[in-house]
């Protein structure tokens, strides 16, 4: 895929972070509902997209993404100390964090050994989608440095997610964001080929291969809608690849799958926003997105700071 001209890149950085936040906030309204229930309530994607008429609040997905983006904007790279500090500084437990995530972040806050707390809650390491949901800024900043991107995505996972599938989920979302950020014209074959090259586990390779054959939204359910990375990361990627021209369709299809709606829509929205740019995210939803101290204005500025770091480092 060809590279996007630089002047379009800022809109893509903004589209990615705000696309994630809008997807998360819209999906957050329907977390854990079933696809059948959602289908009975919303006859199509347009009905879902037009449904909200009051303020949209984001959840832990966006809050942790902000921590990743702040770390990259401040230091130019992920270091575990800075990342944990950012997670703690942003932490509002009522934003929908899982029980294990709360325990790990509270251990960081108290200066306790958070890795052993993570091990207690998730023996063998968490294989949830918590590292994948927050990793998009890594895909943006290192969009033309694939090796660095993979290493940084891995580093951004480790404080909370040590299981190979939890880490690989994050690396794949970062890779999808990178690919979408660079592409001027989406080419499905090249996109999935790049993701297959990124895979190190058989489980994810098989899932990506299945996703690459999907031609209709009815087939998306076969990829899963759970809170584990294997059953949500590729689902989000496939939602984007099926409708790369439309943020509404990508995020709407993700939400209507039910299950872990906020995280799947957040990941799909990040990739879609990175490809389409900020202007293709419905203005109505952006206007409804909360705008407090770390709301939409802050997130847009954070994307700008990340873009400045990218511009300084790029030749
Ligand atoms: Mg959430």
Image: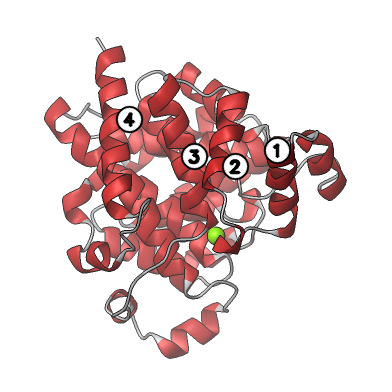
First in sequence: mark 1 vs mark 2: 2
**Mark 2 Cα shell of 10 Å, populated few (<14), some (14-19), many (≥20):** some
Nearest to the eye among marks 3 and 2: give it. Answer: 2
In the figure, 275 relative to 256: above or below? Answer: above
First in sequence: mark 2 vs mark 4: 2
Nearest to the eye among marks 2 and 4: give it. Answer: 2
Q: At numbered mark 1, what does the secondary structure look like: helix, strand or loop?
A: helix
Q: Which residue is mark 2?
A: 88
Question: Does mark 4 have its CB less than 8 Å from ligand 1?
Answer: no
**Mark 3 Cα shell of 10 Å, populated few (<14), some (14-19), many (≥20):** many
Q: Residue furthest top?
A: 315
Q: Residue 104: x percent and y percent?
A: 73, 45
Q: Which residue is mark 4?
A: 306
Question: Does mark 1 have its CB less than 8 Å from ligand 1?
Answer: no
First in sequence: mark 3 vs mark 2: 3
**What's the residue at 74%, 40% (across, down)?**
110
Quarter that holds the C terminus: top left
Q: Which mark is residue 108?
A: 1
Are the residues tagged 1 and 2 within 8 Å (C-beta)? yes
Asked whether residue 102 appears in the rendered view, the answer is yes
Nearest to the eye among marks 1 and 3: give it. Answer: 1
Q: Which residue is mark 3?
A: 67
First in sequence: mark 1 vs mark 3: 3
Nearest to the eye among marks 1 and 4: give it. Answer: 1
């Amino acid at each position: 895929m060809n590279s996007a001209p630089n002047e379009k890149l800022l809109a893509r950085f903004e589209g990615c972070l705000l696309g994630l936040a809008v997807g998360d906030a819209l999906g957050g309204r329907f977390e854990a509902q079933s696809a059948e229930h959602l289908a009975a309530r919303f006859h199509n994607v347009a009905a879902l997209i037009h449904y909200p008429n009051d303020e949209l609040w984001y959840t832990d997905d966006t809050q942790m993404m902000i921590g990743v983006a702040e770390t990259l904007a401040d230091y130019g790279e992920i270091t575990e100390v800075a990342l944990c500090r950012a997670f703690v500084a942003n932490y509002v437990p009522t934003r929908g964090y899982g029980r294990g995530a709360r325990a790990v972040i509270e251990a960081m806050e108290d200066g306790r050994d958070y890795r052993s707390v993570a091990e207690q809650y998730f023996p063998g390491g968490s294989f949830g989608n918590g590292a994948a949901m927050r990793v998009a800024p890594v895909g943006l900043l290192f969009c033309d440095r694939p090796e660095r991107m993979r290493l940084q995505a891995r580093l951004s996972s480790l404080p909370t997610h040590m299981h190979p599938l939890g880490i690989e989920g994050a690396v794949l979302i970062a890779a999808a964001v990178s690919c979408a950020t660079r592409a001027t014209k989406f080419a499905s074959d090249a996109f999935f080929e790049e993701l297959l090259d990124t895979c190190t586990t058989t489980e994810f390779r098989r899932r990506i291969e299945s996703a690459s054959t999907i031609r209709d939204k009815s087939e998306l359910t076969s990829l899963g809608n759970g809170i584990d990375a294997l059953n949500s990361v590729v689902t989000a990627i496939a939602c984007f690849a099926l409708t790369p021209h439309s943020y509404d369709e990508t995020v709407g299809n993700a939400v209507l799958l039910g299950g872990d709606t906020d995280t799947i829509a957040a990941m799909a929205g990040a990739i879609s926003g990175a490809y389409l740019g900020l202007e293709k995210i419905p203005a109505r939803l952006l206007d409804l997105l909360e705008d407090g101290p770390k709301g939409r204005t802050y997130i847009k500025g954070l994307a700008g700071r990340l873009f400045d770091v990218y511009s300084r480092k790029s030749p």
